[in-house]
Structure formats: C-alpha cells, structure tokens
Amino acid sequence: MNSSSPKSNSTWLIVGASRGIGLELTAQLLKRGDRVFATARNTDGSELLKTVRKTANDRCHILECDVSSESSIQVIYDLLHDFKCVN
C-alpha cells in the first residue's frame, strides 16, 4: 500500500494489531481511509496502537480479543454484527 492508493471505505478486522505486522497494517489501512477493528490480547499495554488510533478519528476501534477463547471470539463477532460488518 502506498500513498497513491485510492481512498477506500473498506472495513477490516486485524488480529494481533498491537505490534509488528498487525500494527503496521492497521496504520496503513487507516492512512488510506479505511475503518479498522484492531484486536489485541491485552489492550492495556497497546500504547503504540492507541497512538495510531489518535490519527484516525472514529475509524479505529481497539478491541480486546484472545483468539484461543471461543467466548472472546463470540464477543467480537457480535460487536461486528452490530456494526453491520458481518453478513
């Protein structure tokens, strides 16, 4: 993704968005205008992700999710369904 990419209105779910590739992907998607639901196992320690969110207005939603927990995944699914992101 480069800065010449067209503006997009896509919605993304990024798992593991608090660092590494997930954090960079989140930043790039927000930069091009997409909406991102960024998940992390521990949102309290996600200072870099919170910094990225500050530049995104209301397009970045940080959610706590442990993918090894079925109930945690269900909470994320329900939330995305409420946002009309899941068919």
Image (spheres, grey):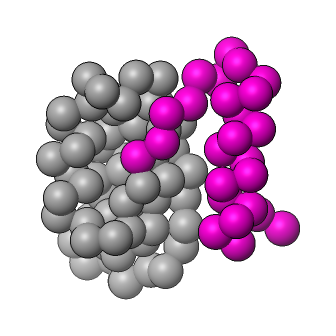
Does 8 appear above or below 70? below
Considering every residue shown, the one lying at the far top of the view is: 68
Q: Which residues are magenta?
A: 62-87
Between 50 and 30, the residue placed more toward the observer is 50
Question: Would residue 86 appear left or right of 9 to someone viewing this image?
Answer: right
Q: Residue at x 56, y 30 (%)?
A: 65
Q: Quadrant of residue 59?
A: bottom left
* 11 vs 76: above or below: below
Say which residue appears at 71% left-offset and 19% top-offset: 69
Residue 55 place in picture, x, y as percent: 17, 64
Residue 86 coordinates in the image, percent (x, y):
76, 63
Is 38 situated above or below 36? above
In this view, the residue in front, 4 or 23, is 23
Left or right: residue 60 versus residue 52 is right
35 drawn magenta: no
Examine the rendering and report whether any part of residue 3 can be seen. Answer: yes
* Quarter of the image where one finds residue 18: top left
Q: Is residue 65 left or right of residue 85?
A: left
Q: Quadrant of the N terminus?
A: bottom left
> Is residue 64 rendered magenta in the image?
yes
Q: Quadrant of residue 66?
A: top right
